[in-house]
Image (cartoon, rainbow, N blue to C red):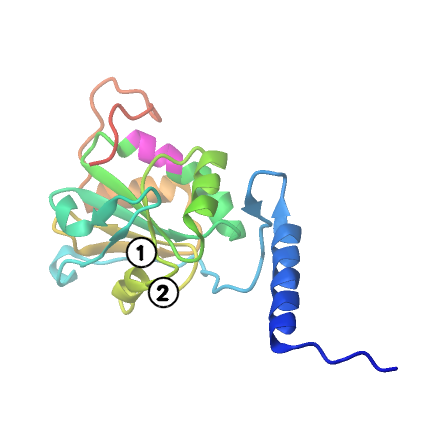
Amino acid sequence: MRAPAPTPARRRALAGALLASALLAGCGGGDGLPAAQGQNYVAGDGTIVQTPEAERGEPLTLSGTGIDGEEIDLAQLRGQVVLLNTWFASCGPCREEAPDLQRVWEEYSDRGVRFVGINTYDTANVARSFNRSYSITYPSVLDAESGQAMLALRGVAPQATPTTIVLDAEGRVAARVSGPASASTLSALLDDAGAAPAPEGAAEGATPTGAPA
């Protein structure tokens, strides 16, 4: 006797169970992070572009809600050099560059520089797990639901992950990197964009004394 065909509700339940199993299988190490992937996203090609000051155009407008529910608005960071970095937790190159990003943030946080991540894919819990795993202390916008932050970057930078964009103190795009960037590259771009000189006698890579504004 042929078994009755599953009802629509039953099919939805089975699909949900399969999805949950797949998500659990994708998590690694018990740290709440999905397994790193080497594809299924647009990878950067390592291109570095710096824009001369006279050609930088209008200030970039971007705002959103941070991982911990805080509101982040680039307009409130005018007067400071800003580094933007797109990422998500299972992006392999994002994991590779995370320690360098944090190291440079610690060095430049008291030099008129602010870092803002743009998480393009994850929930707040996954993003927080990533930050704990990689000791990331700068804020990130959660953009998976609205896509507004990435929309603001359209035409400004390649839609690759990771992408780093450096804004000058007026909020204009001074440089961009498609793909992961080394600490030395990040430092050079921040310096060129107008970061304040390191305090005399300051130890390189010192822990920041204050939280981001």
- What's the residue at 36%, 65% (across, down)? 158
Query: Residue at the location (62% across, 66% down)?
Result: 13
**Residue 176 — which label?**
1
How dense is the environment of label 2, judged by Cα within 10 Å: few (below 14), some, or many (20 and up)?
many
Determine crowd level at label 1: few under 14, some 14-19, many 20+ residues with C-alpha closer than 10 A: many
For the record, the magenta segment spans: 102-107
Give 67 or 76, whichever is nearer the viewer. 67
Please state, as top left, top right, bottom left or bottom right, where the C terminus lies in the image. Answer: top left
- In the visual, does 117 lie left or right of 195? right
Quadrant assignment, res 211: top left
* Nearest to the observer: residue 68 or residue 191: 68
Was residue 104 drawn as part of the magenta stretch in this picture? yes
Report the Cα–Cα distance between label 2 and label 1.
9 Å
* Residue on which disc 2 sits: 158
* N-terminal label among 2 and 1: 2
Which amino acid, by three-letter code, is at mark 2? Answer: Pro
Label 2 sits on a secondary structure element that is loop
The front one of 209 and 194 is 209
Name the magenta segment's main secondary structure: helix
Relative to 177, is 159 above or below? Answer: below
Q: Are marks 2 and 1 in contact (CB under 8 Å)?
A: yes
The quarter of the picture where residue 182 lies is top left
- Residue at the extreme right: 1
> Left or right of 14: which side holds 81?
left
